[in-house]
Image (cartoon, grey):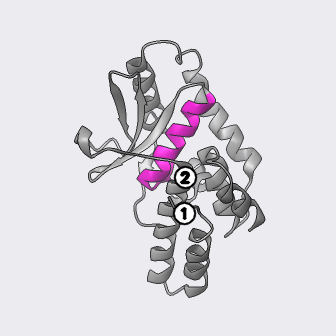
Amino acid sequence: MEGFTRLACGGCPPVADLLLALAGEFRDVDAAATDARLDELALPLFGLASGDLRVAAAELANILDTDPGFDADRSSVAGLWLDAALESRAGHPLILAAIATEVGRRAGLDVHVLSAPTGWYAGLGDGDRLWLVDTTMDGSKADPWSLRRHCAHELAFAALMGLSERYEKVGDSRRAGRAAMLRSRLPMR
């Protein structure tokens, strides 16, 4: 728990760092392999940070959607693990948004995870416009006034809520309780 607690108690860390530490609280994680996958996905985005963010957003969407794209997995425990989502190319929409954010960050883009009642998104803004990437590519539209930006701590909190729910559903009270305990390590704002 030291890795997760250390990251959770400090300033807001990179999304991938906190989500990998979270997964490491429940199972073995190959952080080096995950980093390599994220770096590889970021390659097409290099050089786009100083250009048209519309182009960068389109390229980010291509990374999630192009063969082999990512599929939404809204129900499994594995869908809430960053490393497992990268390996299986299926994850909960919040994890897909985290992947997009982390891939963009590694290429120098200022990408954020946003949510609305309609879903989870990755967003790039230039001050005048916000370019959204729908992580599930299901065509859902977000009301711009309902969008909310999330830090890594909030994503970890949401993932831990999902894990608690899924573990309770299958009768694994030990892991559900662990997820609840880890939520208590996150700063409340």
Amino acid, disc 2: Ala
Picture disc at residue 173 = none
Q: Quadrant of the N terminus?
A: bottom right
Quadrant in the picture for residue 129:
top left
Image coordinates of residue 12 in percent, x first then y, are 61, 48
Residue marked by disc 1: 78
153 vs 62, left or right, is: right
Q: Nearer the viewer, residue 121 or 80?
A: 121
Picture disc at residue 85 = 2
- Give the mark, 2 or 1, whose residue is nearer the N terminus: 1
Prevalent SS, magenta region? helix
Residue 154 visible in the shown view: yes
Amino acid, disc 1: Ala
Q: Nearer the viewer, residue 107 or 183?
A: 183
Residue at image coords 59%, 63%: 186
Image coordinates of residue 151 in percent, x first then y, are 51, 48
Residue 114 sits above or below residue 52 on the image: below
- Dot 2: few (<14), some (14–19), or many (≥20) neighbours within 10 Å? many
Image coordinates of residue 119 in percent, x first then y, are 32, 50
Residue at image coords 70%, 63%: 5
Range of the magenta residues? 88-106
Mark 2 to mark 1: distance in Å? Answer: 7 Å
Residue 140 visible in the shown view: no
Quadrant in the picture for residue 147:
top left
Describe the element under mark 1 as helix, strand or loop.
Answer: helix
Residue at image coords 40%, 25%: 58
Q: Nearer the viewer, residue 69 or 25?
A: 25
Residue 143 sits inside the magenta stretch: no
Residue 106 sits above or below residue 70 on the image: above
Residue 103 sits inside the magenta stretch: yes
Residue at image coords 50%, 55%: 155
Mark 2 touching mark 1, by CB under 8 A?
Answer: yes
